[in-house]
Amino acid sequence: GQNIDQPTEMTATEGAIVQINCTYQTSGFNGLFWYQQHAGEAPTFLSYNVLDGLEEKGRFSSFLSRSKGYSYLLLKELQMKDSASYLCAPSDSNYQLIWGAGTKLIIKP
Amino acid sequence: ETGVTQTPRHLVMGMTNKKSLKCEQHLGHNAMYWYKQSAKKPLELMFVYSLEERVENNSVPSRFSPECPNSSHLFLHLHTLQPEDSALYLCASSLREPGTGANVLTFGAGSRLTVL
């Protein structure tokens, strides 16, 4: 079967660094997406990894290891506005996204 | 404004009502999607219209009926819903290119549905 596992909730301090992990099992693989969703708003695209390694985009970086079925999203210099849910979604052999339940990130001053 | 517009934003309906959700995109995308989002659960793909074909999740009840009259508009017709259908219904669109995985979805803000 297909399965996505990510922590339900994490708490971090403003200005710090946090890493949100995601492990996955899918039928085939065509890359992995991370989306951010603020409460009451639409999910918005953050990153897409299809090859192993780290992709850096400003304060956010995303890592992929295909052999381990593992990805993480790294957020640096946390700001209060980063409080949101972060959704991990690998793409399967039919290019359909398989969604995790999301990690709710709480930032404290 | 995300480029994908959904109406209404909030809808309360009885189990015997018939209503429709509307989605519109002007991004030039060629695929549109309906997702259901319930609290603390993964996004559930309901329907996809892509490259002139429709794909559906076989677990979606027949009381949900999609309609896609053109590549910019998508509807979800609702009838005789149940209280457990209360959720946030998200529309999304993307520019699908055959054989590539970089299919970035742009979501609408959602329609919050409450079934009494």
Image: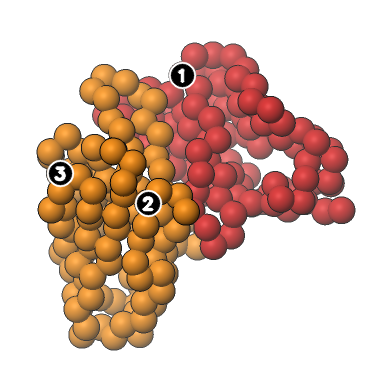
Name the residue tied to disc 2: B4
Residue contact at pointers 1 and 3, CB within 8 angstroms: no
Asked if labels 3 and 2 share a chain, the reply is yes
**What's the residue type where badge 3 is placed?**
Arg
Closer to us: A42 or A62: A42
**What's the residue type where badge 1 is placed?**
Val
Q: Residues within 10 Å of mark 1 (few under 14, many from 20)?
A: some
Mark-to-mark CA distance, 3 and 2: 19 Å
Whichever of labels 3 and 2 marks the residue nearer the N terminus, that label is 2
* Residue at image location 15% in from the left, 44% down from the top: B54
* Residue at image location 50% in from the left, 62% down from the top: B39
**What's the residue type where badge 2 is placed?**
Val
Name the residue tied to disc 1: A50
Name the residue tied to disc 3: B54
Residue contact at pointers 1 and 2, CB within 8 angstroms: no
Q: Secondary structure at mark 3?
A: strand
> Is residue A50 in view from this perspective?
yes
Q: Secondary structure at mark 2?
A: strand
Taking the image as shown, residue A103 lies to the left or right of residue B113, namely right
Residue B33 higher or lower than B97, as above or below: below
Q: What colour do you see for chain B? A: orange
Identify the chain drawn in red.
A
Which is in the foreground here, disc 1 or disc 2?
2
Mark-to-mark CA distance, 1 and 2: 26 Å
* Residue at image location 55% in from the left, 18% down from the top: A65
> Is residue B37 in view from this perspective?
no
Mark sitting on residue A105: none
